[in-house]
Image: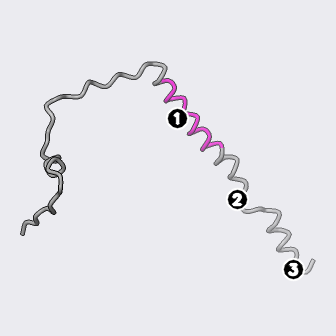
Amino acid sequence: MFRRREPVPFAFLAEADKFRSNVTPPPRERASVGQIAGRWLLGLTIISALAGSLVIGMPALSPDQSAQSQQSQASQGR
């Protein structure tokens, strides 16, 4: 029912998951206004680049109207 762990040659590795530190880490430093503004600017730049590439790439993805009319005229023998 319960599987035994494989033997580990070093005792501290076997007991490492049991160890809990009583020392709390120091609180994280708050980001400055400049850092927050920089993150927002980077995010807006990436989003606008993606939107711009989509707008520029849309004509290439749409079917070409002139190619269809030329093809239909050729199939009619004109």
Q: Quadrant of residue 22?
A: top left
At label 1, which amino acid type do we have? Gly
**Which of the 4 image quarters holds residue 23?**
top left
Is disc 1 surrounded by few (<14), some (14 to 19) or many (20+) residues within 10 Å? few
Residue topped by disc 1? 43
Q: What's the mark number on residue 76?
A: 3
**What secondary structure is found at the residue carrying circle 3?**
loop
Q: Is residue 62 left or right of residue 49?
A: right
Residue at point 7% right, 66% down?
2
| Depth order, front residue of 31/60 | 31
Q: Position of residue 56 (x, y in %)?
A: 70, 47
| SS category of the residue bearing label 2 | loop
Callout 1: SS: helix
Residue furthest to the right in view is 78
Q: CA distance from mark 2 to mark 1?
A: 29 Å
Are the residues flagged by discs 3 and 1 in contact, CB closer than 8 Å? no
77 lies above or below 17 = below
The answer to which of 25 and 36 lies nearer the viewer is: 25
Eye-nearest disc, 3 or 1: 1
Residue neighbourhood size for the residue with mark 2, other residues' Cα within 10 Å, grouped as few (<14), some (14–19), many (≥20): few
The residue under label 2 is 62
Compare marks 3 and 1 and give the one earlier in the sequence. Answer: 1
| Residue at 34 percent of width and 22 percent of height | 29
Identify whether 74 is placed above or below 67: below
Q: Earlier in the sequence, mark 2 or mark 1?
A: 1
Q: Quadrant of the C terminus?
A: bottom right
- The quarter of the rendered structure image containing the N terminus is bottom left
Query: Magenta stretch mostly in which secondary structure?
Result: helix
Segment colored magenta: 37-52
> Residue at position x 24%, y 28% from top?
25
Amino acid of disc 3: Gln
Give the mark, 3 or 2, whose residue is nearer the N terminus: 2
